Structure formats: C-alpha cells, structure tokens
Amino acid sequence: MTHHPAPAPAGATPPTGTRSRTHTWEPPTSYATAAGRTGIQLARMSLDGRLPQAPICGTLGFRLVAVEDGAATFEGEPGEHLFNPMGTVHGGFMATVLDCALGTAVLTALPAGRAYTTVQLGVNLVRPVLATTATLRCAGRAVHVGRTTATAEARLVGAADGRLYAHATATCAVFPLAAPA
C-alpha cells in the first residue's frame, strides 16, 4: 500500500527552503532540417545555435560544448534538484549525459540520410556526485560506425580536475532517416 501525504491546506506556507526550477526549450530538430545533412553538420548546427539542443539538455542542466568527427563533449552542473532519496545526484543524470555523448559521437560519424538510436547502454558509476560537485565534462567517442550498428564509449569526469565519476559504452542501431508518415 502506498501512502500519499495529505495536500497542504489552501494558503499554507510552503516548507522553509522550498526551491523551484524552471526551464524552456525549443522544439527538436525536424525531419526537414535533418534531410540532406550529415550527422557532423547537424551536431555543429546545434553547437553554434542554428539548431536547438535536445530538450533533455535543458531539463537536466547540461549542454553540448564540442563536436568533431566521431566525438562529442557535453558539460553540466549537478545540483540538489537531481538528488535521489540518498541525498546524492541520481545515477540517471549521469546515465543521460553519458548516453547523449555516446549517441552524439555516433551521430557525428553518420552520412546524410542516416539516423541512430541507442539499443544497449552499459554504465559504470564509480564515484558519487554531490550537489557541491563542480562542473562535469562527458566526452564520447565512436568506436565503430557501420551500416546497421555503431558502438561508442564515454567518460564523465570533473571538468577542472579530471576525476572519473562514470564511464559507459553503447551499441546503437543505424537506420535510414525516413520522412514522417
């Protein structure tokens, strides 16, 4: 049985220290924008602001900061808004940043007309991330990009000190970019 606390009475004062977080986002890239462009072109367009970054970036507070052929780097600031019940940043934050770096690294190696999706993600969390942890940097690198599959690896480190917090691998399915029905 799940217990749900009673709602606060109308006009009640919120608990001391209550915080809020608001973010906005632009609609993600459309098929029309992607058609005819290589993955590295799309990633560079996102990096320089000609295309919006993925909405998940704003939701969790990280951003694309560098791309090159077969590689992508993201940075983000952890905080208590990402806490799990244990009072540390939820592993899902790290997994999401890693997945974005892995997938974007694969994207940068794709020719025009091809897309990808992650089909397997292996994450190793090696150090807790706290609200006071400084900016994290996640660099992903494509290991293999073929006609139907791709693999990549990534490391999540402290941007200033290089301390390893997590590392991951991914397998992606590669497929033709199809116009929406």
Image (cartoon, grey):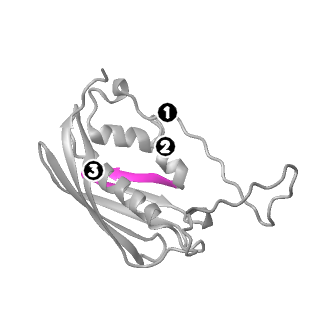
State if disc 3 and disc 1 touch (CB < 8 Å): no
To which quarter of the image does residue 177 belong?
Answer: top left
Name the one closer to the observer, 17 or 137.
17
Q: Residue at x 66, y 48 (%)?
A: 22
Q: Position of residue 141 (x, y in %)?
A: 26, 59
Q: Residue furthest left?
A: 147
Q: Residue at x 52, y 54 (%)?
A: 60
To which quarter of the image does residue 85 belong?
Answer: bottom right
Q: Position of residue 65 (x, y in %)?
A: 44, 53
Name the one closer to the observer, 71 or 1.
1
Q: Residue at x 88, y 50 (%)?
A: 11
- Residue hosting label 1: 27
What residue type is disc 2 on?
Pro
Disc 1 secondary structure class:
loop
Disc 3 secondary structure class:
strand
Q: Residue at x 55, y 75 (%)?
A: 86
Give me the C-alpha separation between circle 2 and circle 1.
7 Å
